[in-house]
């Protein structure tokens, strides 16, 4: 009902005001969810419960407010953990497990593993994007192991940020990109990277 109320307000009375909103929070006091704003039709399946690091759901509005709404956290969610889908022209907000994964990977490194359709590419993209803005990181290499995954990943990355990935056609091209400090994110295959590491150049 709360979700439908937001949709009604957007359509009929508060559309201009709602254009300034990036994240909506809906609650009946017992169950609380958040979701990204959009100029397109919004879908209830993209409303998310917030959780703690151990994936325990924080449903209650009061507890949600204490955990999700402190100034530092909500501003971090808006500035770092939202992505514009460039193809669909749609705003996306990360799920809790994606947020915690990126936070931990930024601190300690590690790997991303999850089931199909869980948003691994979005998590990987956001991690790559945040690492590429770190002054201590010269370049971010995103390695994939199959050509079909290569194409799929590049398409997804470019959805999230147009032309963010330079696709390498050959080992020589990869080596040239590695020498170009303006190339912050390079997506390539493990095989090409292996060849580049063995190459005298």
Image: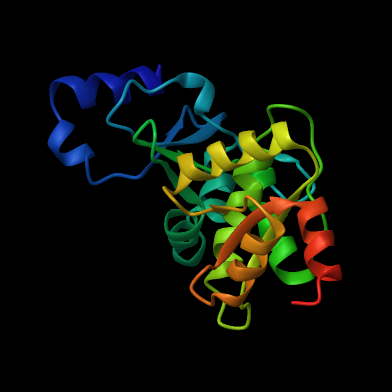
Quadrant in which the N terminus is drawn: top left
| Residue 47, image x, y percentages | 51, 29
Q: Residue at x 54, y 37 (%)?
A: 155
**137 or 117, nearer to the observer:** 137
Displayed quadrant of residue 180: bottom right
| Residue 31, image x, y percentages | 56, 29
Can residue 58 be seen here? The reply is no
Q: Is residue 29 depicted above or below 121 in this figure?
A: above
**116 or 190, nearer to the observer:** 190
| Residue 124, image x, y percentages | 66, 50
Can residue 148 be seen here? The reply is yes
Q: Residue at x 52, y 68 (%)?
A: 183
Q: Residue furthest bottom?
A: 136
Q: Residue at x 61, y 59 (%)?
A: 186
In the figure, is residue 107 to the left or right of 76?
right
**125 or 37, nearer to the observer:** 125
Quadrant in which the C terminus is drawn: bottom right
**147 or 103, nearer to the observer:** 147
In the figure, is residue 199 to the left or right of 166?
right
Q: How many marks?
A: 0
Q: What colouring style does the render use?
A: rainbow
In the figure, is residue 38 to the left or right of 105?
left
Displayed quadrant of residue 79: bottom left
């Amino acid at each position: 009902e709360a979700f439908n109320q937001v949709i009604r307000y957007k359509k009929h009375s508060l559309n201009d005001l709602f254009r300034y909103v990036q994240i909506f929070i809906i609650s009946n006091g017992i169950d609380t969810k958040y979701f990204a704003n959009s100029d397109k039709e919004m879908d209830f399946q993209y409303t998310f419960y917030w959780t703690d690091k151990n994936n325990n759901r924080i449903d209650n509005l009061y507890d949600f407010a204490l955990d999700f709404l402190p100034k530092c956290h909500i501003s971090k969610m808006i500035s770092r953990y939202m992505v514009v889908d460039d193809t669909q022209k749609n705003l996306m907000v990360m799920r809790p497990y994606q947020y915690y994964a990126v936070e931990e990977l930024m601190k300690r490194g590690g790997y991303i593993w999850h089931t199909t359709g869980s948003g691994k590419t979005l998590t990987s993209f956001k991690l790559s994007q945040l690492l590429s803005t770190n002054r201590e990181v010269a370049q971010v290499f995103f390695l994939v192991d199959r050509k079909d995954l290569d194409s799929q990943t590049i398409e997804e990355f470019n959805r999230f940020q147009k032309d963010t990935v330079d696709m390498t056609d050959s080992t020589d091209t990869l080596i040239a990109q590695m020498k170009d400090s303006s190339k912050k994110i390079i997506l390539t295959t493990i095989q090409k990277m292996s060849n580049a590491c063995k190459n005298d150049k």
